[in-house]
Every structure is written in C-alpha cells, then in structure tokens.
Image (cartoon, rainbow, N blue to C red):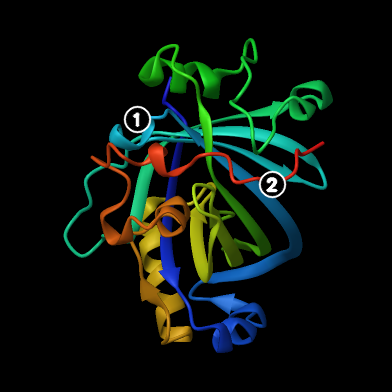
Amino acid sequence: MTEPREIEAKFDIDPADRALLLSTTTIGRFSVKERRTAAQDDIYFDTDDGLLAAAGSTLRVRRTSGGAKMTYKGRREASRDGEGHIASRPEDEAQLDASQAAAIAIDLPLPELDSLSPLARARGIAGRAALLPVARLQNTRATMLLADDQGMTLELAVDDCVGTRLSDGRATPFDEVELETKTATRAALIETADALRSLVPSLRPSPTTKLGRTLGYGDSGPEGRSDASSRGRRGGCARHS
C-alpha cells in the first residue's frame, strides 16, 4: 500500500495581496468550488535534544472548532531543480477523542496516547525520551477547494499566522500560502502553482516550514538542527482544555 504523503507548494505573500487571492474564482484550469475559514491552534513537540528536528520530522497537535488531530510529518524528499518550494513527505494523521485532547497541554510533556499512529512514528525516532512542547502556532486559515473538468482537486490555503517560540515567548507573525494536491497529480500542482504566481505576482516560493519560521531556522528547515527542541521549554501559557 502506498504510504500517505503530503505534496504541496508553499509561498510567502504580501498581506496587501491577500484580498486579491481570496477573491479569485479560477486559477489556471482549476475553479473554486468551495470556500471556508477556520481558526487553528497548533502545538509542536520534540525531545530536549531535538531528535525529531534532526530527522527532518515534526509532531503536532492541532485544535479547531471541529476537534483535535495529531499529525506526524516525515522528512521531505530532495527538491528537484527549481522546485525548492514543492514539498513531498510522509504524513500520518489521527483524530483525538475528547479525553485525549484534554490531556495535552502547552506547558507539559506530551502524554502517552495508546494506539495513535502519528505518535508511534515519532517514538520510532525519539524512543522513550519526553516529547516537550517547543512552539505554538495560531492561524486563521482561509481555504479554497479547487477542481478541474476531470474532477482533479487541489486545496489552496491562505494563512494569517502568529508563531510563538516557547523557550522565550518570541512571537513571529507571517502570511503564507499553501497549494496542496488532494486528488490532482504533481504535474497539475506545479502547473497551477505557476498560474497562481501569474495571478498574484508578489507570491514568493518558500521552502521554509511554519515551525521553521517560528523557531528561527530560516530557509534551511529543521534538518540537522540538534538544538531545535532545547529552545522550546514551556512558555508559561495556559493549559488547553
């Protein structure tokens, strides 16, 4: 069976151009079929010595009005020439029940939650080391579902984010655009990403993850940063419920 993967293109966007992008009805051969807006509140976890970051992986818990999910993302494939902003990586996601979600706090190690495959994957890297909260990301996400005449689909997300590094409380606001394939091919994703850049010229291809922006990795991403999680001590924020 093919392992689930996330394949997406990422861009920086000037805040002034958000309205232009959000008002569009077509991008290349794809049309907007559905729009929605949601608030997301993410906590990212890693070991004290940054084992997940060193392996190019992340583990997060995301809360929305619809509940909470845990997501593990593995190392990105090596980028092809000219496609540094195209990310392809394993992704494993699981819904949390109410009791599991209530046990997760921004100022405590991640509890052991039986039978959750994202946590099992992270444990394959971290072993029994405590998984500590390193960052919080609060995001207002406007999402558009795109479809073409053949029924292929993409998802366009326009994000208004504030990332907080929990070691020192440093808050980093940023705007970002993600174009992710749902049933469309990688070629269709790249074609539509090019059309998107023609529509909104201020879009700038970005290889940087949201966690990277928050923790201050820059364009290099988390890979090889053995000090990643040591920056992420509990930041004095209230417990989520």
- Quadrant containing the C terminus is top right
- The answer to whether 132 appears left or right of 96 in the picture is left
How far apart in space, not on screen, are marks 1 and 2 (Cα)? 22 Å
Question: On the image, numbered disc 1 is attached to which residue?
Answer: 49
Residue at the left extreme of this rendering: 81
| Residue 67 falls in image quadrant | top right
| Residue 190 in the image, given as x and y percentages of width and height | 36, 63
Q: In this view, does 126 lie above or below 16?
A: above
Q: Residue at x 47, y 57 (%)?
A: 214
Instruction: Kindly state the secondary structure of the residue where label 1 is placed.
Output: loop
| Residue 143 % position (x, y) | 66, 63
Q: In this view, does 148 lie above or below 118?
A: below
Which amino acid is tagged 2? Cys
The amino acid at mark 1 is Asp
> Which numbered tag is attached to residue 131?
none
Res. 237 mark: 2
Q: Which of 56 and 133 is in front in this view?
A: 133
What residue lies at 50% left-to-right and 55% top-to-bottom? 180
What residue lies at 65% left-to-right and 57% top-to-bottom? 138
Mark 2 surroundings within 10 Å by alpha-carbon count, few (fewer than 14), some (14 through 19), many (20 or more): few
State the image coordinates of residue 178 (x, y, percent, origin top left): 50, 62
Q: How crowded is mark 1: few (under 14 residues within 10 Å), some or many (20 or more)?
A: some
* Residue located at (34% from left, 56% from top): 86
